[in-house]
Amino acid sequence: MPEGDTVWLAARRLDDALAGHDLVRTDFRVPSLATTDLSGRRVEGVRSYGKHLLFRIDGGLTVHTHFRMDGSWHLYRPGRPWRGGPDWQVRAVLQTDEWNAVGYRLPVLELLPTAHEERIVGRLGPDVLDDDVDVNRLVAGVTAQGQRAIGDVLLDQTVVAGFGLIYVTEGLYLHGITPWTAVVDVPEPRRLLERTRRLMAANRAHGAQASTGDLRDQHYVYGRAGRPCRRCGVRIRFARQRSGRHERDAYWCPHCQSGPGPG
């Protein structure tokens, strides 16, 4: 699933292309919106919240999408070929005089009143990439989780909106604790949250998602199972961790990260 910085960057690019322009054609290729036509309406802006995209349309409407595992939005100049996938994977087209915004493989696509956006984002935790995010609220939300494993909590969008597996994995490595560490046993939780948030914020404008500072080899432990730790040389381990209804990949260095393992 895309990280919050991927969605943030998509929102900024879509906003730059569409905001302030009138829609000359819309094409929604899902049954619930098959007859919907927003042509003639102006795009007021596109913003992200966590991993959600919100296209605000004049007249008090919002097009809400979520990428889940493999959705994406692509921008094309009129007349240029679309290369985001086969045509049958297109779920939405928002066209202005200057751009075609084409949504591929979008598992969540709905139209709702802008006044009802709270139905989507109101159940989420603070957006970690909001420049004005209340860090005290972030810390309070995490520390209230008590005995839950920190790796599970940081991926819970109702507690913290935006973090994904890459940044959680790398943030926990840099903090020196395993993903199975109980929240009550996490030392300096504010430092963990601030550092992991800074990692994501540093990457959001270019999408490289690097935590090492080396774009050729971007991660300390994520995706490096069986390879030597960059610090100590011990082999990185891999297991699965229960996170809500799902099991997520977990990577950690058994030497550099203290705390319990996967049982």
Image (cartoon, rainbow, N blue to C red):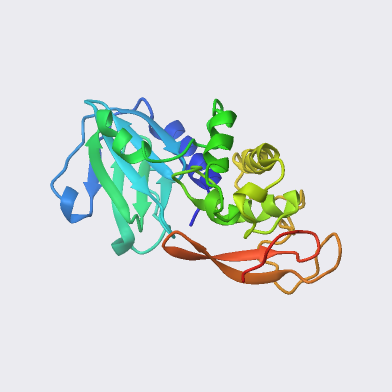
Taking 50 as reference, is 194 left or right? right
Taking 67 as reference, is 217 left or right? right
In the rendered image, the residue lying farthest to the left is 35
The residue under the point 33% across, 56% down is: 107
Quarter of the picture holding the C terminus: bottom right
Q: Nearer the viewer, residue 236 or 75?
A: 236
- Asked if residue 212 can be seen in this view, the reply is yes
Where is residue 171? Give x, y as percent. Answer: 68, 49
Where is residue 244? Give x, y as percent. Answer: 44, 59
| Total numbered badges shown on the rendered structure | 0
Taking 216 as reference, is 18 left or right? left
- Asked if residue 78 can be seen in this view, the reply is no
Q: Nearer the viewer, residue 50 or 190?
A: 190
The residue under the point 35% across, 64% down is: 86
Where 48 falls versus 246 (above or below)?
above
Where is residue 106? Give x, y as percent. Answer: 34, 54
In the rendered image, the residue lying farthest to the right is 232
The residue under the point 62% across, 47% down is: 184
The residue under the point 29% across, 63% down is: 88
Where is residue 247? Give x, y as percent. Answer: 49, 66
Taking 94 as reference, is 164 left or right? right
